[in-house]
Image (spheres, rainbow, N blue to C red):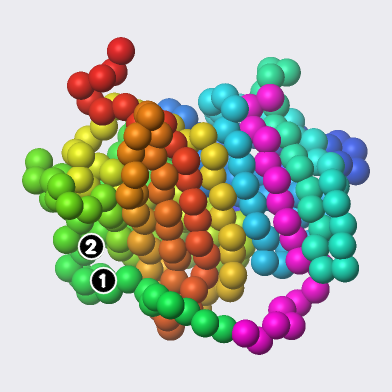
């Protein structure tokens, strides 16, 4: 079994109640990665409802999750001819840490309308992109292979691009595994915050809310990804993402709202 599947696995305690163990394999400076946690929450909603088509999943991060035991309860909150909607709550030590909302299609895609007003990001060849190496405090990069386009890596050597907060590049698991809806929820949160491409290293960018809408399962081994931040004010920023497959098909769109603290404002 792939490490990702092991680490999002659940034990059903009741029809809509599950226990899980949050693993340390997907950490960002010791805190569980938000995309990984979102995959766990979506997995619980899928198991409770039996649906997995074209999910839209939004998670509110109420408090930090740490590696260890956790409990998840799921409730169906609405149902229609096409969609079932759920909410899920994750607790650790009796404290709610996450609240998630999921919308899952009950049927296959029957609407053939298709219009793209933009296309996948133009990326340098894989061989010319800059890999993010495995790091002890960022264990998510032990599991996910991210290759940044060299045009957005100036911050690594202290040269920022003041005109644009953008990261783009290629992504896949280090250990081969086909993409599914749950893994897409993870990948959409594995790139470094794009704000550091313009502002340099920052003190703190914790996610408050994270939402992913998956549209298609990808073809090919790699995802082509781009993430942008356009507005920083009132201590908040947004991160908008697009994930595309190698054939030029849109896979998912994402949005995060996060707090922002620059390096010179840590207190």
Residue 145 quadrant: bottom left
Under circle 2, the secondary element is loop
Q: Which residues are magenta?
A: 96-113
Q: Residue at x 80, y 73 (%)?
A: 107
Instruction: Please tell me which residue is depicted at 20% across the width and 21% down the height of the picture.
Output: 264
Residue 85 in percent (x, y) is at 79, 53
Q: Which residue is at the front of the view, 200 or 38?
A: 200
Local secondary structure at mark 1: loop
Observer-nearest of 175 and 73:
73
Q: Residues within 10 Å of mark 2 (few under 14, many from 20)?
A: many
Query: Is residue 6 covered in magenta?
Result: no
Q: In the image, residue 72 lies at what x, y percent?
A: 75, 35
Residue 178, image x and y in percent?
54, 68
Instruction: Determine crowd level at label 1: few under 14, some 14-19, many 20+ residues with C-alpha closer than 10 A.
Output: some
Left or right relative to 82: residue 159: left
Q: Name the residue furthest front.
A: 234
Distance between the Cα atoms at labels 2 and 1?
6 Å
Q: Which quarter of the figure is the C terminus placed in?
A: top left
* Residue 165 appears in the rendering: yes
CB atoms of marks 2 and 1 within 8 Å: yes
**Relative to residue 49, is residue 123 drawn left or right?**
left
Tell which circle, 2 or 1, labels the residue nearer the N-terminal end: 1
Up/down of 153 relative to 158, above or below:
below
User: In the image, what residue occupies the spot 82% across and 68% down?
Assistant: 82
Residue 13: name its quadrant: top right
Mark 2, residue position: 149
Q: Up-down: is 173 above or below 137?
A: below
Can residue 172 be seen in the rendering of this structure?
no
In the image, taking residue 175 as reference, residue 103 lies left or right, namely right
Give the quadrant of the N terminus.
Answer: bottom right
Q: Which residue is mark 1?
A: 123
């Amino acid at each position: 079994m792939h490490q990702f599947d092991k680490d999002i696995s659940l034990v059903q305690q009741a029809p809509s109640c599950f226990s899980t163990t949050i693993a340390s394999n997907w950490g960002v400076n010791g805190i569980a990665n938000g995309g990984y946690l979102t995959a766990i929450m979506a997995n619980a909603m899928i198991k409770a409802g039996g649906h997995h088509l074209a999910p839209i999943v939004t998670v509110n991060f109420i408090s930090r999750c740490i590696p260890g035991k956790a409990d998840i309860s799921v409730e169906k909150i609405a149902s229609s001819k096409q969609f079932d909607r759920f909410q899920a709550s994750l607790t650790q030590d009796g404290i709610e840490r996450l609240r998630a909302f999921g919308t899952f299609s009950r049927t296959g895609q029957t609407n053939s309308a298709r219009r793209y007003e933009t296309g996948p990001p133009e990326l340098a060849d894989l061989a010319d992109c800059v890999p993010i190496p495995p790091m002890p405090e960022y264990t998510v990069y032990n599991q996910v292979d991210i290759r940044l386009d060299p045009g957005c890596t100036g911050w690594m050597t202290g040269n920022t691009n003041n005109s644009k907060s953008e990261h783009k590049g290629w992504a896949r698991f280090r250990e081969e595994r086909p993409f599914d809806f749950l893994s897409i929820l993870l990948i959409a949160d594995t790139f470094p915050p794009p704000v550091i491409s313009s502002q340099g290293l920052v003190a703190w960018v914790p996610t408050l809310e994270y939402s992913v809408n998956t549209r298609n399962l990808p073809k090919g081994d790699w995802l082509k990804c781009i993430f942008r931040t356009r507005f920083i004010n009132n201590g908040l920023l947004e991160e908008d993402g697009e994930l595309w497959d190698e054939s030029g098909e849109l896979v998912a769109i994402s949005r995060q709202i996060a707090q922002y603290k620059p390096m010179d404002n840590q207190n």
